[in-house]
Amino acid sequence: MSATPFAGHVLSSTVCELGEGPSYEVETDTLWWFDILGRTLHELHLASREQQAHPLPVMASVVARIDDEKQLLATESGLFIRNRVDGTLSLYCELEPGRRSNRSNDGRIHPSGSLWIGTMGKGAEDGAGAIYHVAQGQVTKLFGDISIPNSICFSADGRNGHFVDTRVNRLMRVALDPATGLPTGPASVLVDTSNRPGGMDGSVCDTNGNIWNARWGEGQLDCYSADGVHLSAHALPAKRTTCPAFFGPDLDTLAITSAWEGLSAAEREEDQHAGQLFGLAVEARGIAEAAFRL
């Protein structure tokens, strides 16, 4: 399927080496995202267009609202609670105690208020990572032997979860208990893109159960139905696009992060928008992101 030409805009021209983890906070009309390798949390208030960069002492990849005073951060050293006022971090729990060769990667809050969070080797070693469920301080390993965990997203009713190992490129679906976000059966293949160029990176669901996936290496955003049918493809202005998130008053626009990690000097010169944040209006509505429940 040929991609529709890019009809969006640059939301932020700030360049990230590895832009990831976009998240829209309805309560404050704010977009958050990370430069994982640059150890920075970025903040963009939509109404005022004011942007801030918050340096971090660790690599982090997921941010979630807790309340007006606190946020949850998933990092290479575990889960931390961040104070919004002064940025101080306090350890909430470790994911893989003593394992410093791994870092956090893709993750998302389930409608129940629990967290799904993936880990991976800092060198993307084969099978070094896993996907965990975190609720009330308890960490449960869901899936192991994952190389690059991505595409963690949930249906609006919380009854279906999705994930991918980008090295394998098969989008998985698993039935969930909507009250807890824990699996109630085995995962099965929903979409197999192992024969396509590029890699399945981050994803987000809309209210109809469609899955919007950023295609790393292809500069493309794909939309799949809840049954795995490829519905549409949308070109993006950077090759290494990483993850989408719905934002705005009607949750009908996608913010998509990107990266320049791994590009040569010549490739960066050619890929002028690599590492920037893009906005793309679509004919779909997103799901307001849940807060993490302590």
Image: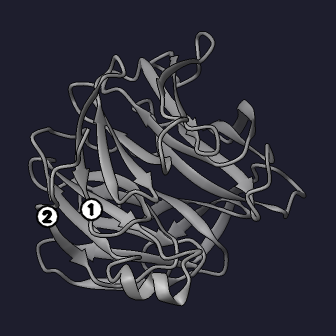
Q: Secondary structure at mark 2?
A: loop
Q: Is residue 65 visible?
A: no
Q: Nearer the viewer, mark 2 or mark 1?
A: 1
Q: Quadrant of residue 127?
A: top right
The image shows residue 90 at horizontal and vertical percentages of 65, 67
Asked if disc 2 and disc 1 are in contact, CB closer than 8 Å, the reply is yes
Q: Quadrant of residue 275?
A: bottom left
Residue at the far top: name it: 185
Q: Residue at x 70, y 36 (%)?
A: 138
Q: Which mark is residue 8?
A: 2
Q: What residue is disc 1 on?
A: 236
Q: Is residue 68 left or right of residue 90?
A: left
Q: Quadrant of residue 257?
A: bottom left
Neighbor class of circle 2 (other Cα within 10 Å; few <14, some 14-19, many 20+) is some
The image shows residue 71 at horizontal and vertical percentages of 47, 61
Vertical placement of 47 versus 54: above or below?
above
Q: Is residue 91 visible?
A: yes
Q: Residue at x 21, y 25 (%)?
A: 208
The image shows residue 119 at horizontal and vertical percentages of 69, 50
Label 2 and label 1: CA atoms lie apart by 8 Å
Q: Is residue 273 left or right of residue 19?
A: left
- Give the mark nearer the N terminus: 2 vs 1: 2
Total number of numbered discs in the rendering: 2
